[in-house]
Structure formats: C-alpha cells, structure tokens
Amino acid sequence: MKKIHLKNMYYILCLLSSFLLYPLASSYAGNIATGKIVKEGIIDCFEEELKSEDNKFVYCEASGAIYTRNSIIIVNDKPIPNKSPIFTLSYPKLLVDSYLQIDTIIKANKYEDITKTLDEKFIIATTSFDRIKTDSSEWDSYNTIVYWENSKPETAKVISATTHNNISTSISLRSKISAVLNNSPYFKIEGIAVLPNNKLLIGVREVGEKYDNYSYVVKIISVNFNIKDGEIILEDNFNLAYEFDINKHENLEINKLSMGLSSLVYDKSRDAIWLLTSHESNDSLNGILWRLSLDDFEGKRQPLLITNFEGVPLFFKHKAEGITLVEDNKLFIIHDDDKVDTGKKPNQAHYTIVEIN
C-alpha cells in the first residue's frame, strides 16, 4: 500500500471538511460571517514626548477612521497642541501625511468618528455630544458635526451651525437627538456613516441621566440630508432606525461584558454596515466586530457576530474605536486605549487589520 504524504493528507482532510460543512453553510446562508486578524501594529500620531501647556504628556486617543483616496483620515478625541485632532495617514505605510490645521476643525472638541459621502466628495466628522452647560456656551463645541470637500479641509463648515462667541457648533441638533432617545438628558455619540439615498447614520454608545449614570447601548439614529451649493443640509426626519441589545445575544461570554457601540461604516460592495462594540473598565479593554446587512438593518434584526473559522468571536485586546474598509476584503481598526499600559508610548495608537471572508 502506498504511503500518503502528510501534505497530501492535509489537502484531503480540507476537502472532506468542505463537503461536510457545505450543507451547514448553505442552510445558514447570510448567517455566517468570519474573519481573521492578519496584521497588528502601532502608529505614531505625533512626535514622542509632546507635552501640553501644563507640562503633561499628550496621549494619542484615536477614535475614528475613514479610508479615502489612498489615505486614512484619523480623528483624535483630544486636542493635539500646535496641530489638529484630525490627521491623515498614508496607506499602506501608515505614516502621518498631514494635520488638518483649519480653525473650523480645530475649534470642535472630542471627535469620535468620521465618514464620507458615497461619491467621496465630502468628509463628515462628529464630536461626542456628551456634555453641555445650560447657563453658558462654554461646552457647545462638544456638540459639533463638521464637513469639508474631500482633500480640501480649508472648505470646512459646520452642519446646522449656531454661532456663540465666534464659535460655530451644531448645538441645535442636541434637542433633536435627545427627543429620539426619549428625551434622555445625557447621551454620547460615537459613530457616523452615510447610506445610499443621502441617509446619515448617527451611532449612540451611552444613554442615561448624566455622565456618571448611564447605560451602554447600540442605537442608530438616521436622518436624511441634501447637498446644495456645497452645503450639507439635514432634513427634520430624525428617527431611531435601529437598536440592538447585546445582552440578548446567545453568546454567553459577550453577556458578561458591558459593551456599547464605538464605530460604524457602510460597505457598498456588501450593502452592509460594519459595527464595532467595545468594553472598558479599569485595565480591561476589548472590542468585537459585527456585520449588519441593510436588509437586517431595516428589519431591525440582530447583526452577525464576526468569528474565526472555529466559531470563536473575533475579540480585540484593545478598546476598538474606529473602523474603515481599506481594501475590498480588509478592515482597518484603530484603538483608543487611553492611558492604559498596553505596550505603546503616549504618542502612539494600536491598530488591527482584519481580513473578512
């Protein structure tokens, strides 16, 4: 009897596995989504040992990303002295190309996510909307959505602008968002994306009474917009388009974590939305990746949890904060580990590239 070479045996086993798994995969078409981490690394957001005016180290706290025209635009949720909280990375080298040092961009506080229109003509970035002072305009800048013509940051404008003390913000949107969230006095925005037919999605991570009394959520608000003479104008049809209770997911390991939405991006080729949820408590950080078809989005059904081929959820060991497609089958994920020691310097941020199947 001829000996079977180990390599040939491997191929035979793979072939048999494919035949055995085919009926299962066919039965659940659309209900299986897998991926694998193909690269992990660190980017330098700015020079090492950069310090603030009070002589403290400045931390890179990258919170959102969008790929466009061979670059990734990153938003940082803290100011970067003498630079800008929004900067561009070359791809695939992942080196800083430029900082968008435009007054309209710099004056907004706490950026959380960034997106682009489907024709890539405009870039849109949102802040957190997580604070306000009722007796002053001091914190209005935390309530801002900024947009500009792609590759022309000097054209930056504020959506639904209201001006106080020479600073334009989107503070007028706050009451509209709160109304959709049952008039919640506190909420935090961490996602933004554009769908076909000029629909803007706003992802909500936290809802509650105040900043220290809230619940993590996965809620998505939608509103339509028009573009006229280079200006993005929102319609008045804000509504809660989607929500998902992670605690009702069948995966018990996930149920042990308090997780909220941290980013979303529309995938034109798959007609789906990629979602990130993340968890943070003391020194515990992680994130999970999901895919939500537009059919499931409109039908308000659960998103698909992304797993490896063995069915294990694709956990990230960092606080996953921003997501974007960099190639048809690759997702770039930027992490914001704040001041937790995860093997990086203050001026750096971890990233992960996931290959999706």
Image (cartoon, grey):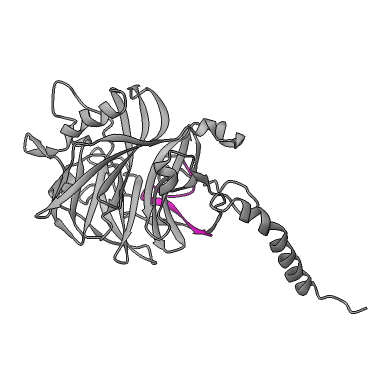
Towards the viewer: 109 or 329: 329
Towards the viewer: 168 or 121: 121
Residue 100 appears at what percent x and percent y? 20, 55
Towards the viewer: 105 or 176: 176
Image quarter in which the N terminus is found: bottom right
Q: How many marks?
A: 0
Residue 325 appears at what percent x and percent y? 40, 58
296 in magenta: no
203 left or right of 356 in image: left
Residue 281 appears at what percent x and percent y? 48, 32
Magenta region, residue range: 341-357
304 shown above or below 179: below
326 left or right of 168 in image: right
Tell me the residue at 18%/46% (across/down): 106
Residue 80 appears in the rendering? no
204 shown above or below 118: above
Tell me the residue at 59%/35% (across/down): 250
Tell me the residue at 60%/53% (across/down): 308
Towards the viewer: 194 or 53: 194
